[in-house]
Image (tube, rainbow, N blue to C red):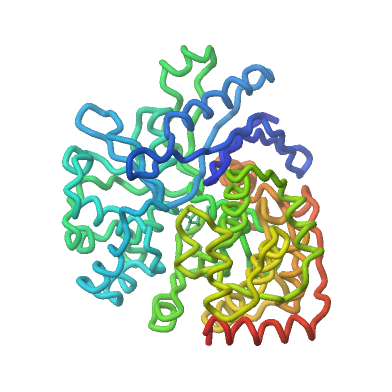
Amino acid sequence: MPSILAYDLGASSGRALLGRLKNGKIEVEELHRFSNDPVGVGDRLQWDILRLFHEIKQGLLKAKHAGVTPASLAIDSWAVDFGFIGRNGELLGNPYHYRDHHTDGVMERTMERLTASKIFGRTGIQFLPFNTIYQLAALKEADSPFLQGAERFLMIPDLLRYFLTGEMHNEFTNATTTQLYNPLEGRWDAELLADIGLSSSLFGEVVQPGTRVGSLRASICEELGIGSVPVLATAEHDTGSAVAAVPALERDFAYLSCGTWSLMGTEVDRPIINELAQELNFTNEGGVYGTYRLLKNIMGLWILQECRRAWERAGQYYSFPELVSMAEKADAFKSLIDPDDAVFIHPGDMPSRVRQFCAASGQPVPETPGEIVRCILESLALKYRYVLELTERLSGKSFSGLHMVGGGIQNVLLCQWSANAIGKPVWAGPVEGSALGNLVVQWIAQGELSDIWEARQVIRDSFPVTVYEPQDGTRWEEAYGKFRELTGLA
Ligand code: LFR
């Protein structure tokens, strides 16, 4: 069986995985892993896109050294971010990081001008201050020279694919996250684009996951000394790939894709665009094979990752397992935060922000790293319960448990506490959700797997799922009451 290659780029690290289908099971080999370090230059926080492209080439070289010519490759990454291609076919500037401050206040202004119901009604996408629409509106307001020179708009995987193949296409799952794509009409929303003063000509044909979108340019094959490889579009939004890989057997399942972000929701056949969805600020991101992800972004392990970086800057290095073990020893439910408070979005001194949140809400102030991490993880688990209940209310489904996928499930304390908080079992696995979703979409395109349900069964047969049964119900129930009171979440 030939091998295929999946690149999965997260906000803090990327990896290249080689996948093979053998006797109905998936075998994966991690070829290459690298950090993704955003770089602050002047006032802007930017992605080091050329470094990422370099790492993609390293993945190809490692495949060559392993004696493998992949039958195809595809790339998925975080959503919403983009770059522009100019008249000469070159990238204009580095893509900005979605956590950059240039969008401060832009969402509020745009919502007022266009109205929230128009934006949501035409896109079904939740309001997040860093959505592409607000990033573009911010560039427009700033009269950005990049925008002036732009001929084409490409999102991160589109861009890296373009570097690899020389061909420009916008991929569907990622395009929907811009809040500029109209799923009801099945195209970019020309009216919203006009509202923010952008020409539709920047936005190209939208291709579905599984489409062949070129092959490696001759210059890359020559540089690396390799043969040409077909390049496919997969579910290029990492969350789209992660949900494609949820090893569910039942159609009505709830998932939590757990990484830098926690994305919780359910898969639906058509977008749910109504007043309740808008009021609860749920999203309908495009998925594979006509599905949509009715979900909500929860701030996720970002707060913990950012605390760890702050401690590191202060000269105290803790590994994640160390932090989790310190949290386990700290007192339970001393103080709680709303992880989705706007103070936690931007990079910075996160331990101070957690302390300030607790002080301002009249709670004991967590001091030690163990106390802070405990506060973050308990609060996340409680927020999961809240969002799971909203998902049930909005979708009209009821869930017997929760599938958790992604790197965050290596945090067993979080998995157990999530089960405790929701009072239902958590089924955790696989860890490499996005990369596996990326691979199975390629296999379906090649006819190696018949459809997404066969793919989910094969993933289930190939990777372990750890079951966490809920414990300690009464204490978590009490804590949930306290959490809702404190955060004002009705
Ligand atoms: C997760 C993710 C989320 C998206 C956020 C920003 O990696 O793709 O789905 O809301 O990153 O792009």
Does residue 356 lie above or below 389 as drawn?
Answer: above
Could you tell me residue 315's position as x and y percent? 64, 42
Q: Is residue 159 left or right of residue 2?
A: left
Q: Is residue 433 left or right of residue 40?
A: right
Residue shown at 43%/28% (left/top)? Answer: 164
Image quadrant for the N terminus? Answer: top right
Could you tell me residue 272's position as x and y percent? 44, 75
Residue shown at 41%/16% (left/top)? Answer: 219
Residue shown at 45%/18% (left/top)? Answer: 220
Q: How many marks?
A: 0
Does residue 229 lie above or below 473 as drawn?
Answer: above
Could you tell me residue 297's position as x and y percent? 51, 65
- In-front residue for pair 379/94: 379
Determine if residue 455 is in view: no
- In-front residue for pair 117/460: 117
Quadrant in which residue 473 is drawn: bottom right
Does residue 237 lie above or below 374 as drawn?
Answer: above
Determine if residue 329 is in view: yes
- In-front residue for pair 257/446: 257
Quadrant in which residue 150 is drawn: top left
Could you tell me residue 395's position as x and y percent? 54, 79
Q: Is residue 387 left or right of residue 18?
A: left
